[in-house]
Amino acid sequence: AVLLQRLGVPELPVVGVDSFVHSDAARHAVLTLEKLFMHHGSDKAGAHDYHCLYGAILASPGDIRAVCEIGLGTNNEDVASNMGRHGRPGASLRAFRDFLPHAQIFGADVDRRILFTEKRIQTFHVDQTDLHSIDQLAAQLPMEFDLIIDDGLHAPNANIAALIFGLGKLKRGGCLVVEDIHPDHVAVWQVVAALLPAAYRKFLVAARGGMLFVIQRN
């Protein structure tokens, strides 16, 4: 906050996750995604209300062609940011696959043991603490994405690496979402928002159980 004040840059206001739901199509998508997340065992609904944001972003599911999520939700407890032994790796990927009839769904995780391939889902290894690994992931995924999600290692350095990946991979109109931002790290995202060019819309979002940083490419 002090840095932004010295630079004369206003802070990004915090908005509620419900504020993105503006249409009947979005409301329908929110309800459908909530059911799919719960069915597949994703904490994006239930523990969180992130489905409200994703329903708004994906309100026209037939138009979405590519989604990528970093962080599959490992259930191996020797990995940082794991979901616990009862977690279901890839749960949100399966929910997005079921919701988006024409989309290819891609995932990436540091835990090679949980990588998998299914109908319209491919997953890859990535280490968010290694920019070379981020570059390798980008090379393996040459397409642009309608939606990129960072639900991996919940630390600012790892989140910034995902942002670097996403800035080169978003379609026009596409969104990147960083999940589960700790309140102590909000100041980092205020600075990131100030640094991003006008080609991106920026949002800091308050949701149940966590905060989100969202950018949309104009």
Image (tube, rainbow, N blue to C red):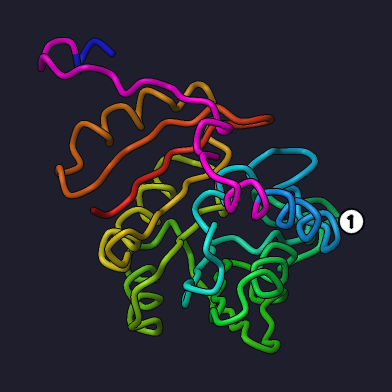
Dot 1 alpha-carbon crowd within 10 angstroms: few under 14, some 14 to 19, many 20 or more: few
- What amino acid is found at the position of numbered circle 1 in the picture? His
User: Toward which corner of the image does residue 14 lie, by quadrant?
Assistant: top left
Q: Is residue 82 left or right of residue 182?
A: right
In the rendering, at what x and y percent does residue 184 appear?
A: 49, 21
Q: Nearer the viewer, residue 218 or 132?
A: 218
Q: Is residue 18 in the magenta section? A: yes
Question: Does residue 81 lie above or below 129 as drawn?
Answer: above
In the rendering, at what x and y percent does residue 103 appear?
A: 54, 79
Residue at left offset 28%, top offset 13% = 1
Q: Secondary structure at mark 1?
A: loop
Q: Which residues are magenta?
A: 5-29
Residue at left offset 68%, top offset 56% = 79
Residue at left offset 57%, top offset 76% = 105
In the rendering, at what x and y percent does residue 55 appear?
A: 59, 51
Q: Is residue 125 in the magenta section? A: no
Number of marks drawn: 1
Q: Residue furthest right?
A: 86
Residue at left offset 42%, top offset 31% = 204
Mark 1 sits on what residue? 86
Q: Nearer the viewer, residue 32 or 76?
A: 32
Question: Does residue 54 lie above or below 105 as drawn?
Answer: above
Q: Nearer the viewer, residue 72 or 213?
A: 213
In the rendering, at what x and y percent does residue 97 appear?
A: 66, 74
Q: Nearer the viewer, residue 88 or 216?
A: 216
Q: Residue furthest front?
A: 24
Q: Is residue 21 left or right of residue 38?
A: left
User: Toward which corner of the image does residue 190 lie, by quadrant?
Assistant: top left
Q: Is residue 162 left or right of residue 76?
A: left
